[in-house]
Image: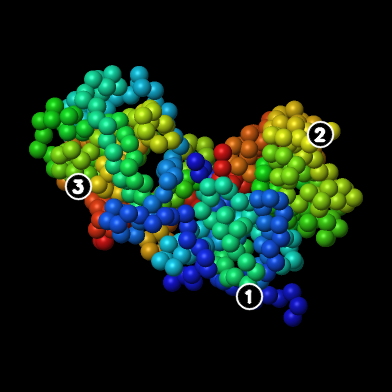
Amino acid sequence: MSPVTRGFHGKRREAEGGRVPPGQYVTEDFPVLSAGPTPHTKEEDWTFSVRRGGKEQKSWTWTELQKLPVEQVTADIHCVTRWSKLDTRWQAVSIETLLEQVRTDAKYVLAFCDGGYTTNLPVADVTGGQAWLAFGYDGKPLAPEHGGPVRLLVPHLYFWKSAKWVRGLDLLDSDEPGFWETYGYHMYGDPWQEQRYAGD
Amino acid sequence: MAGTALRRRLTWQVGTVGKVITETATAKTIELDVPDWAGHRAGQHLDVRLTAEDGYSAERSYSIASAPGEPVAITVQRLEDGEVSPYLTDELRPGDELELRGPVGGYFVWDGEPEPMLLLAGGSGVVPLRSMLRHRSQTRSATPARLLYSAKSLPDVIYRAELDGYGDAGAEVSYTLTKRQPPGWTGHVGRVDQALLDQLAWPAERRPIAFVCGPTSFVEAVAQGLVMLGYPPSRVKTERFGGK
Amino acid sequence: MPVLDGNVLGGLLHEVFGTEMTTAVGTCASCGSSREVAEFVVYLGGPGVVARCRDCTALLMVITKRRTMNCVDLTGLSALS
């Protein structure tokens, strides 16, 4: 156990009771954390595909995405590195809107992204009004360093599941680890049960 | 057994804060008393770890500002929205304990080699380079040395009096001020560009070694500029700090 | 955006490997380029630290910290000497 540093508190502020999962601290910042260089995909080149067994089931262009019902989503987000940001505001399309156009009995998805990042989620967690494709933040187009043009937004799980630069979902029968999950992070990632690492 | 320090396995240990010296309005040098300190090389750094009462911890790396043979000291630049630096510059006091790991590094070090050295500092990137110049001065080295230090304004220049004094020891120090210049300023203005590098860099034929340290964008632009002047990439040592 | 280089990994790698590692030469398993660890492109990625090849951006090292234990994955390197 490291010795306590006199007078050090970090930048955190005390959060309103009950809003913040265990072990988290509230920040006003929006840290930029990534595992590689920022891709710069133009809207006109962006597509989102749902695939099964390597075959595309359906895809949407940027224009087609914009034609779907857009929601103003306000959510608290929780990063596994312990910062939480409250009341973040996004402009997004519910993933359910896209998945209901694809007939599937798949139980899991693996989200894939520009730059090669992946993350896995149960289908049950990207439907039911729990997950979105977000392309606006705070009323402005989502900046590339925060995942623009489009990122996944799944606020009920740790934020590494809200994959930046998302380009599609692979439908799977069984749960397969994505990037951070392969390196020991939890397959599900519920911040309220502090599921940071595999085995938690 | 003077000079034979106990060799410790590199791991976290606790040092005690000695003197704290104000260098500029936003930078402080913190001297540390570290048990069994085995000494350090010019250019190395320390990792510092702060732990709050509830177990939350944050780690950062800081270059060693003192020369080999001197007590270890780091210089910390306070970042406005930093998490660790404001604690170190505003809160830390002599007598406090600080958890650290070091000295670290074997790539970005100068051990007194005779080939001309070209030092390029972007902001707080000057810290490890000052350790090198201090080492050069204390060992009365004949190595030709030039420092080009890019800072926002003159009050932001760390160690100014000391750096200006190295002129007497044959080290040429110049500054380029990027945001504000004092009235009557005759030094360089603006970011380091190819023209300034061309003017100040040792010719490649003299087999110089360059040390470039500062924010990532500064380091990449300068390193590329030196390679364009004919410096072999292996003779351009780089150390990137966080920042724009 | 914290994009740094392998110098910042020096302390952790020294602790894990028991020796100075920033001057160790790593060979990228993807493109074959060889560089000192100090010259790797390092992303402080949140869940973990990622080091990539400066020449082709392939993944070289992934370092994660679980409680007090560091885990260093080197599968992106075909050699490290």
**Dot 2: what SS?**
loop
Q: Amino acid at mark 3?
A: Asp
Q: Residue A168 vs residue C51: left or right?
A: left
User: In the image, are marks 1 and 2 on the same chain?
Assistant: yes
Write the residue at 46% across / 65% down. B52
**Dot 1: what SS?**
loop
**Snapshot quadrant of residue A33:** top left
Q: Which residue is at the far right?
A: B168
Residue receiving disc 2: B183
- The numbered disc on residue C57 is none
Residue closest to the eye, A128 or B37: A128
Q: Residue A172 vs residue B235: left or right?
A: left
Residue closest to the eye, C28 or A186: A186
**Dot 3: what SS?**
loop
Residue receiving disc 1: B35
Residue receiving disc 3: A175
Q: Position of residue A179 (x, y in %)?
A: 33, 46
Distance CA(mark 1)–CA(mark 2): 47 Å
Subunit under mark 1: B
Q: Residue B122 vs residue B186: left or right?
A: left
Distance CA(mark 3)–CA(mark 1): 51 Å
Q: Position of residue A186 (x, y in %)?
A: 28, 54
> For the residues carrying marks 1 and 2, which lies nearer the camera in this image?
2
Write the residue at 70% across / 66% down. B19
Q: Amino acid at mark 1?
A: Pro
Q: Residue A61 vs residue B58: left or right?
A: left
Residue closest to the eye, A43 or C6: A43
Q: Are marks 1 and 2 in contact (CB under 8 Å)?
A: no
> For the residues carrying marks 2 and 3, which lies nearer the camera in this image?
2
Q: Amino acid at mark 2?
A: Pro
Write the residue at 23% across / 38% down. A131
10 Å crowding of disc 1: few (<14), some (14-19), many (20+): few
